[in-house]
Amino acid sequence: MAEVCRVRSSGTMIVLTLVVAVLSVAGCNGAKQPHIVFIVADDLGWNDVGWHNPAMITPTLNRMASEGVILNSSYVQYLCSPSRTSFMTGYFPYRTGLQHEVIAAGQPRYLPAHFTTLPEMLGKQGYRTHIVGKWHLGMCNWKYTPTERGFESFFGYYSGMEFYYNHTRLDGYDFRANKSVALDPTRTYADYLFVDHALDIIEKHNPEEPLFLYLPFHLVHVPHEVPARFENMYSSIQDDYRRIYCGMVSMLDEAVKNVTDALEKAGLTDNMFLIFTTDNGGPTFNGANNLPLRGAKATYWEGGTRGAGFVHSKNLLQKTGYTNNGMMHAADWFPTLLHLAGSKPDSDIDGVNQWDMLSTGVDSPRTTFVYNIDNITRAAAIRHGDYKLMVGSPGGWNGWYPLPKLHAQLKEQLAHDAEDVDQQWKPQLYNIKEDPEERHDLSSQMPEMMKFLQGELEKYRQKEVPPQNAPYDPAGDPKNFGGVWTPGWC
């Protein structure tokens, strides 16, 4: 029987999915190793942050973004598990087998154990490594869970989503403290619990030791649940999905405030690098918005893959208070954070060290990246310089979606666009610098560029790993483990 512990909450804090990094330039000029806090927001849309949309109430995120460096061309993957794969390994997901959709509850899919993770590498440099929030990189075997992948502690859930108050996914309970089931008899909102636990880690941390705190929050992923005080901040919004979603974004903002206030109080921010990023574009079908970008979560359009984010530090950034347009990919955080910790990757990863660009504003060393290669859907996309090539279906939501007045008004368009995933798409070419909204397909006008990018894409295909696509396995049914999602069946 699984070991069980109970969780507590002060009821005053909030959660979020953000990427915050607390670092000092270690190994560079012999400086003391910085603390690293990596915060990831879940399903945050391009138009759902205050620096893109003044209607969003995100004062903490706005302040930090304006004090730091806003990332205008920071790319993530089109879905949750693929982005987390890149964050943790420095590889494009098509090289790990996690390029196809996400790891669904009960599927024997996982980040293969032979990949060295970011916390494993940082642990070798003396970092104390903790994860609070969402894992979503496999749980069918204990060896795929966080405390077997380099984290010395884990507080959160294994799957891709769950109900915020009762911590269940489908017919099973999914909440853990390390490997023990974390019972919550008070049914406290998950992100309150995450923030409380993060504060506990921060308060107990020895500031003389470097800290890596990974905070992949549940917010603002469905289900649409948020305390009333946040929903009421947007009482003028008629659409239920949009009103609740916006409340969840503001709850995320408060969560970031509570975490960063604790970091300040503990004296950790004097030598800290903070990263905030989403894991994919916003799901317009669930109340998010990506205007003026095209598409949504689960697509290869810019609206599904260009992530809202920023970096912040009191002491490490030489140039601040501006928007950086340099090309960056989720895989780049791996070597960049290792550089700050005084290390470097020990394998031929896809990520590149972006520290010079982030800290001084020089040009990005990256000229090319792969949005994805998926031989199940026969779809792929690549960016080189200003140009983007897409082959096959870009996904199921392919339009430009306005802010909804009533969600029903979007249903017809969304339903029509969802059918597009099965249609025959010809290859498409866009100049993203001149046409970030992807309105003008240049494929017929630039045959030489088409030929070049198709050739580049084929080169990358040579390293493709067959995508994992195992179906649901009844062996993992929570009924076999007392109603709890539990590893140990693959």
Image: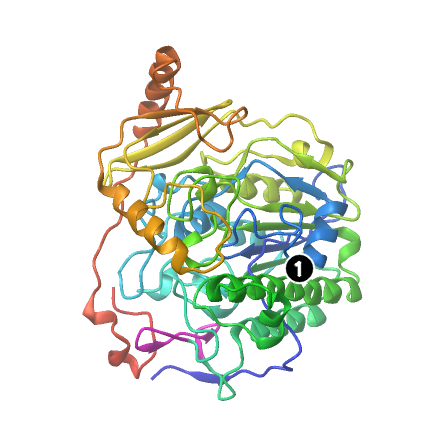
The answer to if 69 sits in the magenta stretch is: no
Q: Nearer the viewer, residue 60 or 30?
A: 60
In the displayed structure, would residue 29 be above or below residue 249?
Answer: above
Which one is nearer the viewer's eye here, 352 or 361? 361
Q: Secondary structure at mark 1?
A: loop
Amino acid of disc 1? Ile
User: Total of numbered circles in the picture?
Assistant: 1
- The quadrant the C terminus occupies is bottom left
In the image, 381: left or right of 55?
left
Q: Looking at the picture, how far across and down is residue 322, in whole percent? A: 73, 37
On the picture, is 225 further left or further right than 487?
A: right
Residue 259 picture location, percent across and down: 68, 65
Q: Residue at x 54, y 46 (%)?
A: 46
For residue 362, above or below residue 202: above
Mark 1 sits on what residue? 57
Q: Could you tell me residue 331's position as x and y percent? A: 49, 41
Residue at position x 22%, y 38% in the image = 423
Look at the image and tell me in which quarter the N terminus lies: bottom left
- Toward which corner of the image does residue 169 lie, by quadrant? bottom left
Asked if residue 246 can be seen in this view, the reply is: yes
Q: Counting other residues with Cα less than 10 Å from the Cα at mark 1, is it few (<14), some (14-19), or many (20 or more)?
A: many
Quadrant of residue 61 in the image?
bottom right
Is 179 part of what is drawn in magenta? yes
The picture places residue 97, in percent across and down from the top left corner, at: 31, 45
Q: Which residues are magenta?
A: 168-181
Residue 345 in view:
no
